[in-house]
Amino acid sequence: MGRPRGVRRLFRLPAGRRRTENEVELEFRHHLEMRIDELVDEGYRPDEARRIAEAAFGSRRWYRQQCVVQRRREARMTWMRESIGNLTTDVRYALRGIRKQPGFAAAVVLTLGLGIGANTAIFTVVDHLLLRDLPFVEPDDLYTVHARGTDGFLASDLPSDMALALDRADGLGRMYWSTRLSAVRNDGPEPTTLVLQAIEPGFTSVFGLPPTLGRPFNPDDALPGASRAVLLSHSYWVSQYGRDPDIVGRGLVIDSIPLTVVGVMRPEFRYPLYGATQLYVPLASDATALGREFARLEAVTRLAPEEVPGVEAAAARFVSGLRESLGDTSTWLPAWSPMNRPMVNPDVRRALYVSLGAVTLMLLVALLNGVNLMLVRGTTRSREIGVRLALGGSRTRVVAQMLAESAVLALLSGAAAVVLAVVGVEALWSMAPGELTFFGGQDIGVDGRILAFVALVSTGSGLLFGLIPALRAVTAAGATSGTAMSTHAASGRRPVLVRQLLVVGQVAVSLTLLFGAGLMGRSFHTLVSQDPGMDPEGLVTMNVQLSPGRYPDENTRAAFLRGVTERLWGIPGVTAVTVGGMGLPGTAVTFGDGLYLEGEPAPVGEGFTILPLATADPTLRVTLGTRLIAGRDLRPEDRPDDRRVLATETLARRLGATSPSDAIGQRFTLGEEGRPMEVVGVVEDARLEGMDPRFGRAAFFRLYDVDAPGHNLGFLVRAEGAVPPLREAMQAAVRAVDPGQPIQELLPLQQILHDSVQKPRFFLTLMAVFAGSGLFLAAIGLYGVLSFSVSQRLREMGVRLALGAAAQDVRGLVFRSGLALATLGTLVGVALALAVSGALEGLLFETSATDLGVLAVTAIVLLGAAALASYVPALRATRVDPVAVLKAD
Amino acid sequence: MKKRGIDLIQGTLEFLILQTLSSGEPRHGFGVLRWIRDATGGTLTIEEGALYPALHRMERRGWLQSEWGVSEKNRKARYYTLTEAGRRQLVREETGWKEYVRAVNRIIEMAGTA
């Protein structure tokens, strides 16, 4: 038989089949021998007797088998009956123990529940954002084609003239083209801006997800000028039509164009993957949709499975061919990237993994704490166990009973963890920066797989919790069973050492966590205490997109602009109004096409984007509160055609200026084309796009032609007084001019600044929570060990006091041993922290991952907490009444 | 396999085993068989091996208890005794059998008088 004997004995498994067979055979042999004797007595010859006896008995094999079946059934049943009986007793006993010491149970359940629950919550988020496959058919064959700028900047769309070349590319699958647009739905009670994706007809099948209702687009839908069909996204169908099953054939009006609903997409059909697309309209073969023509298109490609391995080579071949035909001057080249890959930026990915690492460290502290608690409890029970063993109790039963106790605790902790995880995920998601929720969508939750993971972790830790102390208690009690009756049995050196090591481990790990949180805190502080280069208070920015259908020419747009401006000035408390095109703070579109000095063939600098600010008001700088560093301001007599600009310091540096005044008179273009602009003044870096270090430092202010406005309009208003009434007044101003015009964005600049650090703030908060919990758990662990050792050494303390030791000496004895543990832990922790803090590199803003100042503060905080945790038990040690303790024995 | 006399059905065999052991004296399998044979004068016969699955089944049901012991001629044998549950079962079966026998008798008598 496969199982070693010890295991069978330990788990009291029924006797093996072979053994049962042998027993039955023995019984049969006895029967036959008796029968043969009888027959011989009657006068048969022995061989005859044997033959008759065997014939009378019948098939031995058959009956033996019958007997074995019965016997094994019996054995199994006895075993089960006994086990169930034992289990019930054990569980009942465990529950009684828990009721008797609710503090202990609560500590274990909280410790474990917190550790596992937080882990589950973070893991759910990581899984949701980073690990899960796209819900598409064969998602690994799908690629997106990006445009990569010479500065490495990736844009999601390509110039549409590149589409022709791409459609002919070899080994790169079939391209599916689409583009994003926003349009106004004007058949409802209020005009609303919708996000649409114009997709070529075949696109409806690229993910292998046909519409859930109605039909996909067909080639007729995409005949130029014929586009009247529209597909609803699933969420739009749900939110706007309440899942109306008769939606197909209904009409809706977009940009004043009447459209007919031909179908509803599946909920899994998400394109683009991020952001919410409400409607899909057909993209005609001449790159038009809804009467608009698109200069840039996005592409998705589905490769044949055999093309996937060679995609990089094929792409490289294609790109080099393209470069040859275009010459080296092209600023954009296509780049392929697998679609079934997390969308979040690498820094967020890193931050997520760091959080997962941090929460795992916290779980480690929690587990160490749990083992420690159980060990302490095991030791306090060693006397009871000793008695039981001495009275002939089986070791197995003792271990089983302690396991039952930890199993019950593990179950409770698991339940606590699940509750915490479910609540935690919701809280995390509501707190999470837009960048996470944007990519993750709303359908996040703790699912079955993850619950199974929780069950596994809590059962595993429960076993660990129970088994170590149980085995320890049994061996310790066994070794000292002769003296089991002594109160001081089993408080030997080794268990104490183990507990001390556990505390050292806890301190070390929580120091690492704390250091991480400290680094992120310092980084965050540096980030938000940057000079914003402006005075955001009282500034509100508003962005309006006029639809080409309703505002076809410059005159109508200029009239709208004038009307709104006039009304904005009429709002009480308003001290400044600036209007501009695409490009007032918060509404600006960053520009990544490369910056060219006049006359230079190649762009200057790499890897940055530029923020062009167009203002009708030459004094925008003053309105913003941005300082002029060199040169002059824009003046009322400057004209938009003069193309005179104010550059920020960063832009001036990009233009090659060594000092701000050096940049005055520099002439540059955005992209290769166009008349150059001339720098007349240099201003400090205004953080108009927020504090995110990646964006918005290279910017320039230029004049905007209010008589020939485009479709994107920006308004910047400064007012004295509270912001909310100002926002409403601004909305009212737009409504008064055109009740049918929606507002795209209306934001106080302070909110832009605040939101721009949402991401680091979120991860800092996470880190702080984990580090705080870790510190708390470590402190509890230290406190527990010291309290326990004090209670074990009460006699010694009593003797010391009785022999005339001063209270402070006794106190110092305990206090010092606590601090010694903490110091050791801190030393180990410093090494550990410095070894792993490199993981934070890239998440820190102008802060070194080995910042010694932060490390010092961390160590001090930790030692302070340790001192506090040691002081209470130390105090208790001196409250010993020597007489009482000595009498107690 | 040739057989003489009345074949025993399972329930009957169990009843006989319970009867055999009701004296309280532990018996091994062959002992049980010998007692049944002697008590019925050899009219009730079974294939001898069939006794054993019955014994083991009855032990599983908790009616019998078994223990290894040493038999006459110093042979190792498994001895069966009746448990409390076995005794109760015997009473139940006895009542059942008596009623059955009474009923069968009445039918035979009725057939005789007709």
Image (cartoon, rainbow, N blue to C red):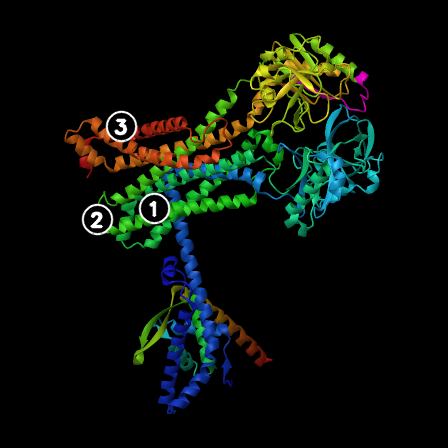
**Residue beneath label 2, please?**
A483
Between A6 and A716, the one lying in front of the other is A716
Residue A108 percent across, percent down from the top left = 40, 39
Magenta segment range? A541-556
When asked about the image quadrant of residue A234, the answer is top right
Q: Is residue A700 above or below residue B42?
A: above
Q: Is residue A620 visible?
A: yes
Q: Which mark is residue A875?
A: 3
Residue pointed to by mark 1: A469
Tell us which disc is closer to us: 1 or 2.
1
Q: Position of residue A344 (x, y in %)?
A: 59, 35
Kindly state the secondary structure of the residue where label 1 is placed. helix
Regarding mark 2 in the picture, which secondary structure is present there?
Answer: helix
User: Are labels 1 and 3 on one chain?
Assistant: yes
* Horizontal side of residue B113 vs A861, given as left or right: right
Left or right: residue A865 versus residue A249 is left
- In depth, the one of B4 and A242 nearer the eye is A242
Q: Quadrant of residue A499?
A: top left
Counting from the top left corner in percent of width and height, residue B79 is at 36, 72
Whole-angstrom CA distance, mark 1 to mark 2, is 20 Å
Residue A378 spot, x, y in % from top left = 32, 44
How far separated are the C-alphas under marks 3 and 2?
32 Å
Circles 1 and 2 in contact, beta carbons < 8 Å: no
Sequence order check, earlier mark of 1 and 3: 1
Specify few, some or many for label 2: CA neighbours under 10 Å numbering under 14, 14-19, or 20 or more.
some
Above or below, A491 relative to A547: below
Disc 3 crowd, CA 10 A, few/some/many (<14, 14-19, 20+): some
**Magenta stretch containing residue A91, yes or no?**
no
Q: Earlier in the sequence, mark 3 or mark 2?
A: 2
The quadrant the C terminus of chain A occupies is top left
Q: Amino acid at mark 2?
A: Thr
Secondary structure of the residue carrying numbered label 3:
helix
